[in-house]
Amino acid sequence: MNEVLQNIKTRHSTRAYTDRQVSLEDLKRILEAAASAPNGMHLETWHFTAIRNKDVLAELNEKVKGAFAKSEEPRYRERGNSKTYCCYYHAPTLVVVSNEPTQWWATMDCACALENIFLAAHSLGISSCWINQVGQLCDDPDMRAFLTRIGVPENHKVYGCAALGYAPADAVVKEKKLKEGTITIVE
């Protein structure tokens, strides 16, 4: 199997991280890969905000918890009131992927960029996980003010985030199995 297909097949989500930070050089490579993803009409209306500061990440988590605490949904309220909940699994780096919501292809562009982030990270030995909560809550006034303050363009919606870091040596990796009936080939 070639390297690209091997990288795709072996990439997996990680939900526990060590404190080891992703090097700035590797982060730049990952962000360049993100910006190389396919995008509608090649307009590149997306934006990537990488957070490596522990205090800023902790503040982000508090904004997520604060928004969840106001939710009508019991499971979100539970997360919002939890002392241990961390939306980014304590990864040392989080990349926020945003786009202009007026572009009908914004969601697809960001999904392609996030997949490039995950594949580039994996190729460099860096673990990752897709994080939805920030996008889900980006219209909450406190969250929106925080996002704008850290550099997410004010006219952007967050479509997803990528937690990046290194998995502990004893991390369990689930075996991937192709679910029967997933693929149909029409000839």
Image: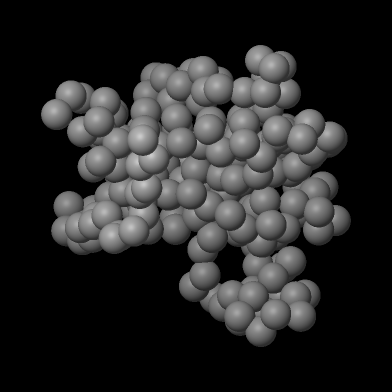
Q: Is residue 40 visible?
A: yes
Which colour assignment does the render follow? one colour
- In this image, 171 relative to 66: left or right? left
The percent coordinates of residue 151 (x first, y second) are: 72, 32
Most extreme residue toward the bottom is 74
The percent coordinates of residue 31 (x first, y second) are: 50, 24
Compare residues 158 and 21 and report the one nearer the observer: 158
- In this image, 113 relative to 133: left or right? left
The percent coordinates of residue 74 (x first, y second) are: 66, 84
Residue at 70% x, 80% y is 73
Quarter of the image where one finds residue 118:
top left
Residue at 57% x, 49% y is 57
Compare residues 46 and 143 and report the one nearer the observer: 46
Quarter of the image where one finds residue 21:
top left
- In this image, 6 relative to 181: left or right? left
Q: Is residue 86 above or below residue 27?
A: below
Most extreme residue toward the front is 187
Q: Is residue 92 visible?
A: no
Most extreme residue toward the top is 42
The percent coordinates of residue 170 (x first, y second) are: 17, 58
Residue at 62% x, 23% y is 39
Location of the N terminus by quadrant is: top left
- In this image, 113 relative to 118: left or right? right
Residue at 29% x, 42% y is 11
Location of the C terminus by quadrant is: top left
Quarter of the image where one finds residue 148:
top right
* Count of numbered tags: 0
